[in-house]
Image: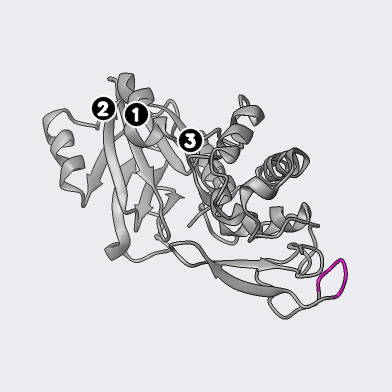
Amino acid sequence: MPEGDTIFRAARTLNRALSGRIVTAFDSVFPKLTRVHDDTPITGRTVESVTANGKHVLMAFSGNLVLRTHMRMNGSWHIYRPAERWQRPGRDMRIVLATAEYVAVGFSIPVAEWIKASAVERHDELRRLGPDLLAESFDALEAAARLRARPDVEIADVLLNQRVMAGIGNVYKSEVLFACRVSPFALVRTLTDQQLDCLISTARKFLRANVTEGLAAMTIYMGFRRTTRRDHPGERLWVYGRVGEPCRRCGTPVEIGKQGRDARLTYWCPACQP
């Protein structure tokens, strides 16, 4: 699943390409989207903004309408020039939105719906999200309270819960826990306030470091290299994807395990994260 920084960068790139432009064509394989387009056409509307809220992309149009998409595991948005060849096959197309200057194509997107702009804050999925780690208004105290509200859950699982903090995925889960020297299997109630503060601040720092200007390409999700350590090939991550390799701190082999209901993979150093 794309993590919060990837969604943020996607929304930023879409916003730069589409914001303020008039929609000249719209198509989708989702009947619920096309029915709205048939009744109240999307063509002729202006794209007002594209923003990220956790792992959701919200594309706002004139006329009190917002397109919400969620990528889940395999979805992505691409931006092309008109007549430019797509980098994925047409069978993967789910949404196409064109302006005179750019064409936005949503590939393999599993979740897409129209929402009235006036109803976004009341939307069931969106209103339940925890504080967004990439939002300027991020509330660290609220995030800590939501962590503490799950005392008997392993911390690795809680970090993935978007209703606690929005934006962390499997990569950041492992990297943040390593950086703060916290065992992924520790129950929340066993952690000190200082440890929780470290997890929250480090997660925000890591995500923000990966949405710096200059990293975004016009084709979204292609070749993005995430780093939590240093911007050097082969040394970008502390533990994620490095099972059996020596810990960058102590040399102990990195281990891997499955956690939670969805058996998500966790990487950790047994010496640095006892």
Viewer-proximal residue, 81 or 10? 10
Q: Where in the figure is residue 45, as x and y percent of width and height?
A: 29, 26
In this view, 221 is above or below 147? below
Discs 3/2, front: 3
Q: Is residue 213 visible?
A: no
Question: Does label 1 or label 3 sit earlier along the sequence?
Answer: 1
Residues rendered magenta in the picture: 247-251
Question: Does label 1 or label 2 sit earlier along the sequence?
Answer: 1
Residue under pointer 2: 44
Amino acid type at circle 1 is: Ile
Residue drawn at 42 percent across, 34 percent down = 128
Amino acid type at circle 3 is: Asn
Question: Quick one: quadrant of the C terminus?
Answer: bottom right
Q: Where in the figure is residue 95, as x and y percent of width and height?
A: 29, 48
| CB within 8 Å, label 3 to label 2 | no
Q: Where in the figure is residue 178, as x and y percent of width and height?
A: 74, 58
| CB within 8 Å, label 1 to label 2 | yes
Label 1 secondary element: loop
In this view, 259 is above or below 187? below
Q: Is residue 169 left or right of residue 55?
A: right
Residue under pointer 1: 22
Viewer-proximal residue, 114 or 15? 114
Colour scheme used in the picture?
one colour
Discs 1/3, front: 3
Q: Quadrant of residue 89?
A: bottom left
Q: Is residue 57 left or right of residue 16?
A: left
Q: Is residue 102 magenta?
A: no
Label 3 secondary element: strand
Q: What label sits on residue 53 in the rendered view? A: 3
Q: What label sits on residue 161 in the rendered view? A: none
Amino acid type at circle 2 is: Gly
